[in-house]
Image: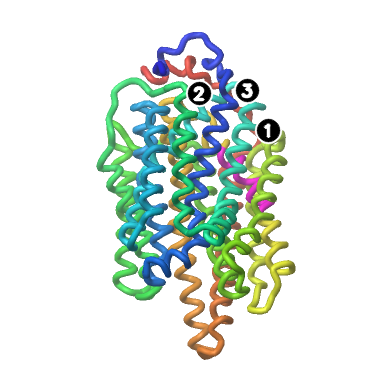
Amino acid sequence: MTDFPIDAMSSSPAETGLDPKRWSILLVVVVAQLMVVLDASIVTIALPSAQRALHFSVANRQWVITAYSLAFGGLLLLGGRIADFAGRRKVFIIGLIGFAAASALGGLAVDQAMLFGSRALQGAFAALMAPGALSILTLTFQDNAGERAKAFGAYGAVGGAGAAIGVLAGGLLTEYASWRWCFLINVPIALLTAVAASRVVRETRSIGKTGYDIPGAVLATAGIVSLVYGFTKAVADGWSSATTLGFVIGGVVLLVAFVVVESRSAYPLLPLRVVLERNRGGAYLATLLIVVGMFAMFLFVSYYMQGILHYSAAKAGVAFLPFALGVIVAAGMATPLVPKVGPRIVISTGLLVAGGGMLWLTQIGVHTSYWTHLLPPLIVMSLGMGLAFPALSSTALTKVRPEDSGVASSLLNASQQVGASLGAALLNTIAATATASYIASHGTSLTEEGTVHGFTVAFAVGAAILAVGAIVSALLVQGPTKVIPHSVAASTSELHP
């Protein structure tokens, strides 16, 4: 397995983006991305069973999700920089192996501390794996616009449908095996993917002086954790409490300090040129908003089906299958549309459609039916997501310098993971507050009605967030643009100013 530093590549098929193993590489990347996305949602339906088995509280159950997404989102930028300079294939494989080990630890957890810790470790290794995977894909498909569109269409479809597939898999595994298999299933998949990557992926790395922005990594991670924890504390302490405001304001201050540090660092964790380009910046912000808004659907529809409609875990998982299929179908439609009409129209339309479906969900009640009140809006949302995600992924990585491919990839993933953390904390807080207010006004005999009321308020807020994402896309992402061929060999001059 020979290393191929970027500046050492000579004339070869891979140099022009036509690596003969490119479709095998795409399969490896898609499997890795699917595993990362699945792991963020596969535990959603398994949570009640894990909670009963390990005896942790309702207040603590969110940390099964949040520990993963915080570690993942907080460390992604550092993981992307490590991949750029240490070698993308090497770091990708290390991430896969570590992810397998952390998954095994979670599957064997004997108490809540072991489970939460394993989830944080999964997130940390995913922060190495995910940016390596996406930057490998970016460098493999560069010069052929048609192939690039297909590759990112597949990647985007996995990103959009993966959460629903995860809920389905989690339901089936929990019902017919054990909630522990929601973690253990990752072990063979991750190890087989690592073996495949070692055989088909060539090593690439950025050259020049190597440095890691540790202060930036600390500030980014601490800022995100503080912000999310502040939203979480609002459930018990209220939005106006000193604790809530202190953590929220502290998080904002730390993130502002992170931007200041990045503007002055010799080796910035996030070179500001990556995010200040108009199209990429709009794509990152829209991705963050769509994940924050859509999180309400996955979390609260899952609890609605199991808690109010009394579905089993398996039945609830199967009920999400139309959503996954809708995303895949719409992603296939989006692939040829983006080069023709441009990403702005596709992304904005997709977000508006998804927001309309989310608003439709506000009509659910204690006695409403899946077929009339859940399935139609799920299909509408899936079509919107399927349109938006491939265009977002491709736009976020267009015209990225090779030495920035890892950090640009990690920023896209970070937008998704931070969005999941913020969505979990913010929308759960809004739903819990609305439920408590309803029960206080109407009495404890209407607990189920109060719970559903909380869900519908969260859906309305999620729809508003998706509408804001559509506006952001319309204003920041430009119209039809041509992807400029950007071969690895032709880019070496950028690595040596």
Q: Nearer the viewer, mark 3 or mark 1?
A: 3
Q: Percent from the top left, x then y, of residue 390?
A: 61, 40
**What's under tag 3, amino acid-wise?**
Asn
Mark 2 element type = helix
Tag 3–tag 1 contact (CB < 8 Å)? no
Rounded to the nearest angstrom, the CA distance separating label 2 from label 1 is 29 Å
Q: Percent from the top left, x then y, of residue 360?
A: 68, 66
Magenta region:
382-393
In the rendered image of this protein, does residue 12 appear above or below residue 348? above
Q: Residue beneath label 1, please?
A: 339
Q: Percent from the top left, x then y, of residue 185?
A: 48, 47
Of residue 276 and residue 441, the one placed in the foreground of this image is 441
Query: Mark 3 or mark 2, which has the lower sequence index?
Result: 3
Q: Residue beneath label 2, please?
A: 200
Q: Residue at x 54, y 49 (%)?
A: 286
Q: Quadrant of the C terminus?
A: top left
Query: Mark 2 or mark 1, which has the lower sequence index?
Result: 2
Name the residue at the left extreme.
Answer: 215
121 magenta-colored:
no
Of residue 381 and residue 163, the one placed in the foreground of this image is 163
Query: Mark 3 or mark 1, which has the lower sequence index?
Result: 3
